[in-house]
Each structure stands twice: as C-alpha cells, then as structure tokens.
Amino acid sequence: MSGSIAVVGAGPGGLTAAMLLAGRGYRVKVFEKADRVGGRSAAITESGFSFDTGPTFLMMTFILREMFQEVGRNLDDYCTVMPLDPMYRLNFKDVSFDPSRDNEVTYQRIRDTFAGEESGYRKLLKRESVRYRYMYPCLQKPYGNPFSMLSPRLLRALPHLSAGRSLYSVLGNYFKNDNLRISFTFQAKYLGMSPWNCPGLYAMIPFIEHNFGVDHVKGGLSAISEAMARVIKEDGGEILTSTPVSRILTDGRGRATGVMLPDGSKEEYDAVVLNADFGYAAEKMFEEGVIRKWTPSRLDRSNYSCSTYMLYLGMDKIWDEPHHQIVLADDYRRNITEIMGEKILSEDVSVYVRNASVTDPTLAPDGHSALYVLVPVPNTRAPISWDDDCRREFRERVIARIADRTSIKDLEDHIVFQKEITPADWRDEYSIYQGATFNLGHNIRQMLYFRPHNRFEEVGNCYLVGGGTHPGSGLPTIYESARISSDLIRRDLPQ
C-alpha cells in the first residue's frame, strides 16, 4: 500500500494534485462521481455544442504551464492556448470599455473614453505590481498553524494588505470615475464578493489581468481537465468516472485510511486528497463525530460567496459580439447590494455572456454558436424558491437585458439547445454547499490560517484542494492549492 493516494473528485484541484503525485511516482486513483472529468470545469456537450460548466477566464497561464513542467510536460503539447485581445468588453448603460492585453492600447482607450483618468492606469500598474510581488508568494505557502502567520515572508507583505480598506476604496487611489473604478473591481465576482466589501489586497487581481492577459483554450477550458487526465494516465494513474465516494474512512486516531463506495466496498490508501466542495464534504463525507471544528453550526455561520444562475444556449446563428462581455446593471452597486446583502433577485441584473464561438469554432456546429450566460445571484441562504415560475420570470429578465444592451436581439428565435442551472441545482445536483459557486467567502477572517488547511486539521492523512481551502477560489489559486497539498504529501509520505 506504500505510496498509494486516493483523490476524491476530478475537478481542477483534484486533477492537478493527481497529476503532480503520479508524476512523482505515487500510485494514484481518482474517483469522480460524474461521467467525465473536470468537476465545475467539465464540458457540457449536446448536439455538437460544447460549453464549459464553470470557469471561462484563464489568467496567469504561466502557473498552469508550471504544473505541466513539474511532471516533465509542455502544456502546448496538450492544449492550444489562445490569447484574447481585447480581453473582454465591459458594457455600461452609457459607455463600453474594451481593455486590451497591450497596456498602451488600454491607456489610449481610457484616455479616449474616460478623459483625464489615464494617468491613474499607469499608477495602478506600478503600485499593484509591488503588491503582487509581495503578496502572491504568500499564497503559495501553507498556513497549518498559528505560527505560520508570523513567517518573515508574510510579515514583509503586511504593509501591502490595505487592511481595513475595500477593493473599491483602493481603486479610488487611481480613478475618480465610478465606471472606471468598477472596470477594475468587477473582478471581485471571481471571488463571489462585492467590490465594496472585498479586501483591498485583491487590487492585485486587475493588475494580474492587465499584466499577464486573459487566455482561452481551444475546445474550452474543460480541455485543460482532459489534458491533465491524459497525463495522469500516462504516468500510471487511474481515473474512475461515474464512481462516487460516499465516505472518507478514518481510524480510531482520526486519520484517513481510505474511501468507502456507495455499494459499501472499502479501499485503503496511505492518504486521501479531497476535492469535493468543502462545506458539503465536512457535513456529509465523514462519520459522525470525526469533524469537531467545522461542525454544521460553524459551517452555517461562515461567510459564503454568492451563487450564479446559468444558461447554456446552443444557437443556429453567430453574432459579432466579443468573446467575453459583462453587461453591468444600470445601478451596479444596488445590484451587488441586493445579491450580497438583501439576498433578493434584482430587477436590474448584471449579465456575463461568453460568445466564444467567434474565437473558437470547435464549440459548435458550422454556422452555429455556443452562448454561455452567467448571472450573479444570492446563494440558497436567500428565501428564493427557484420553482418553475421563478425560473421562467428570471430567465425572461436575463434575456431581455441581453437584447437591450447587445446586438443579440433575436436570441429566443435561434435557440436549438438549452440547459439551465440555478443555485438550487448547484446545491442539489452538484453538491455545492448553499449553492455558493465560489465557495467560502474571501474575507480576512476566512483566509490563510483561518481557511480550512491544505493538510486538513480535522483528519490526519487527509489533504484539501480546491476553492474551499487555501489559497482560495479561481483556477490559478486552485492549481496552487494542489501544488501545496502535493508538496505536503511528499514531505509527509516520502517515496
């Protein structure tokens, strides 16, 4: 049994961990309940259309490259990375802004659209590069005990935390125009948070976008998961799809010893890597009494991200619209307050539309397109029924917003395939605690040591990966969580 690792969940974190561990010589078996790999990064396929279930923005692609390099591979041998320019369109009620991956082009567009604000852009790039240089390395290290918070690296980064300030407040250092500040703070949605509450240290996210660019992968970001699965198998790992794990087995000393499958069969392993949604796993995947810190009452008291309402639309037409477009509510702050604070469905919605077929024709049949629509909404803590009437009315609201603010006026007339996911579906069908698609919130009290640890503090020989552990949600940080946990396994169970 020496060197045997069970990986529960074939999402980006589980696959990255499995790839790294298999490449280092461990005997790895991945268990995935769905019929394909990827988790929330899996492909939804039907009638020649392909959609990414969840993440569609690929940033910091160099981190993904590093993961492949660590196992002696070149990402470009497995995936075709396509740089996007413009990176996306921000569609306000009275103006549109298309940031370029070329900083000089973006500077000119700010000068043309938000006259007098352009100098703030260069100031942002310079100042936030310093924050990134100090802060990002702190996200690449584990925080398994209180003393880790006193590491010299983290202490040197403290002056760059912008403690007590929100992301929106920090952007006031650079821009006065409200729309422009929103243009560099909407990224808080990657964390499922409000720019007015998101910690100011995340001002490094717009810097990351503008410094490294935004990429697409041919075939969709799901192709990354499929590439990782290929590497895992090349290195002797095993992947079982349509094979859920019902429980993590533990011994009398609180150590993980293996997994139990729904038929009651048990398999023993030296360690378990857990890539299930954290809240769901803590509540459902251990014997009663094993979890004593992250109890149901604590889970319920914790802060969670918003959820998302999703439409995946196969169309018999192609529109000349950007690859990524964010249509912002007329009153964006009110929209965010309704989602995060009042927990109601906004009349004035913000809608993200990915029209990836203009870049990648492999996602739909010839002459067709695959539209991906995401709307931030409250998680299932909100008293929203999501019954048939609610779904129908909200869908109509979303379609109307797209028609009103883009050239996609006749959308309803061209739909040949549709799939819908609501917060209730995320909770019930995808096993996401409270339907919070971006997992535990990223407020200061749920970061670093205060987030569930990569070496799970509740259960020995159990390691967490994914958005619910350190360093948090978003593909680059999920990849980092897998690298951190894999390095801990190599230290704890050397080959």
Image (tube, rainbow, N blue to C red):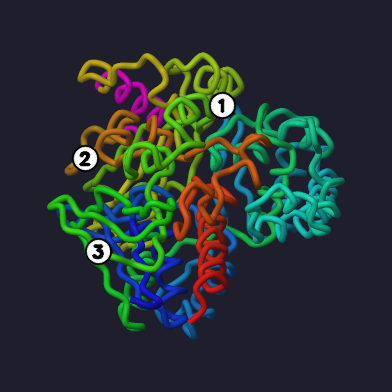
Q: Where is residue 38 in the image (x, y as percent from the top left)?
A: 33, 58
Q: Which amino acid does label 3 sit on?
A: Glu
Q: Residue at 41% of width from left, 60% of height from top? A: 273
471 horizontally vs 363: left or right: right
Q: Earlier in the sequence, mark 1 or mark 3?
A: 1
381 horizontally vs 113: left or right: left
Residue 418, label in figure: 2
188 horizontally vs 321: left or right: right
- Work out whether residue 290 or residue 370 is closer to the camera in this orientation and state it: 290
Which residue is under mark 3?
Answer: 267
Q: Does the magenta stretch include residue 47?
A: no
Closest to the camera, between mark 1 and mark 2, is: 2
Asked if the residue at tag 2 contacts the one at tag 1, i.e. Cβ–Cβ closer than 8 Å, the answer is no
Give the secondary structure at mark 1. Answer: loop
Q: Residue at 67% of width from left, 51% of height from top? A: 145
Q: Position of residue 14 (x, y in %)?
A: 40, 61
Q: In 3D space, how far apart are the residues under numbered discs 1 and 3 (Cα atoms)?
A: 57 Å
Q: In 3D space, how far apart are the residues under numbered discs 1 and 2 (Cα atoms)?
A: 28 Å
Q: Which of marks 1 and 2 is nearer the N terminus?
A: 1
Residue lying furthest front: 252
Q: Give the range drawn in magenta.
A: 392-409
Q: What residue type is labelled 2?
A: Gln
Which residue is under mark 1?
Answer: 93
Residue lying furthest bottom: 72
